[in-house]
């Protein structure tokens, strides 16, 4: 998954060990999995060459990072002119997000 | 590595099979590796759940994606309060970027 972090979200991630992002639409910190329980336990934090991108290696509680229930948000593959979905949802979003 | 694509860059990537980005600072298409020869041959294209992020799986010619010569741009690991570099450069940037 890809999400936005501001300084506060980055600091909270370091301090808590749980992946914390910043929702620009809601203008507030977003502890991933806070409502569903599917938090991301941070195992390693990397930054890129020019220090403007963060890569988190995490243990994904519940097995799925995506709000659709798929393991990864990147579950759509471009195959010639069409898009096919790979993998099955690990949970039912309607059950998790009530 | 993380880089920006506009529609034109995405279309060029699909057509050419070489990872093509858009440089917002130079306001022009950027075929990765065009000058160094270290292009990225695209093996798979994925998009995320809300279709605003592209993930490319590539064969990195020359072995290194980063302008520092490292395999990955994400070669800096946050270790408590310090940053340590992992891996060795595979090429000398001063030789490649003249």
Image (cartoon, coloured by chain):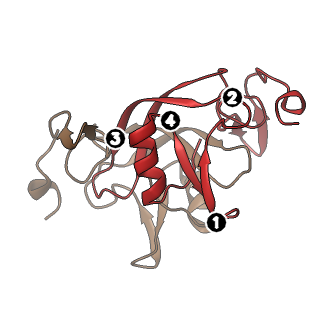
Chain colours: A red, B brown
Name the residue at 53% across, 45% down: A20
Vertical arrangement, residue B48 with respect to residue A68, above or below: below
**Res A70 → quadrant:** top right
Mark 1 and mark 2 on one chain: no
Q: Earlier in the sequence, mark 3 or mark 2?
A: 2
Subunit of mark 3? A
Q: Which residue is mark 4?
A: A18
Any mark on residue A46, and which? Answer: 3
Using the image as rendered, state which of residue A54 and residue B35 is in the foreground.
A54
**A22 in relation to A81, above or below:** below
Residue A42 in view (yes/no) = yes
Query: What residue is rendered at 50% in x and 35% in y?
Result: A18
Of circles 1 and 2, the one toward us is: 2
Q: Which residue is mark 1?
A: B7
Q: Is residue B22 left or right of residue A50?
A: right
Q: Which mark is residue A37?
A: 2
Q: Residue A47's x, y, as percent? A: 33, 47
Spatial CA span between label 1 and label 2: 36 Å
The crowd level at tag 2 (other Cα within 10 Å; few <14, some 14-19, many 20+) is few
Asked if labels 2 and 4 touch by Cβ distance under 8 angstroms, the answer is no
Pointer 3 with pointer 1, Cβ within 8 A: no
For marks 4 and 2, the one nearer the N-term is 4
Q: In the picture shown, does residue A19 fall above or below A91?
A: below
Please, what secondary structure does the residue beneath circle 4 have? loop
Separation (CA) of disc 1 from disc 4: 34 Å
Looking at the picture, how far across and down is residue B22, in whole percent?
Answer: 49, 67
């Amino acid at each position: 998954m890809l999400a936005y972090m501001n300084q506060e979200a980055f600091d909270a991630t370091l301090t808590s060990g749980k992946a914390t992002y910043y929702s620009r639409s809601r203008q507030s910190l977003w502890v991933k999995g806070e409502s569903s329980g599917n938090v991301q336990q941070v195992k390693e934090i990397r930054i890129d060459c020019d220090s403007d991108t963060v890569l988190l290696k995490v243990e994904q509680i519940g097995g799925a990072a995506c709000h659709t229930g798929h393991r990864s948000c990147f579950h759509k593959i471009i195959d010639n002119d069409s898009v096919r979905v790979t993998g099955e949802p690990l949970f039912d979003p309607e059950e998790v997000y009530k």
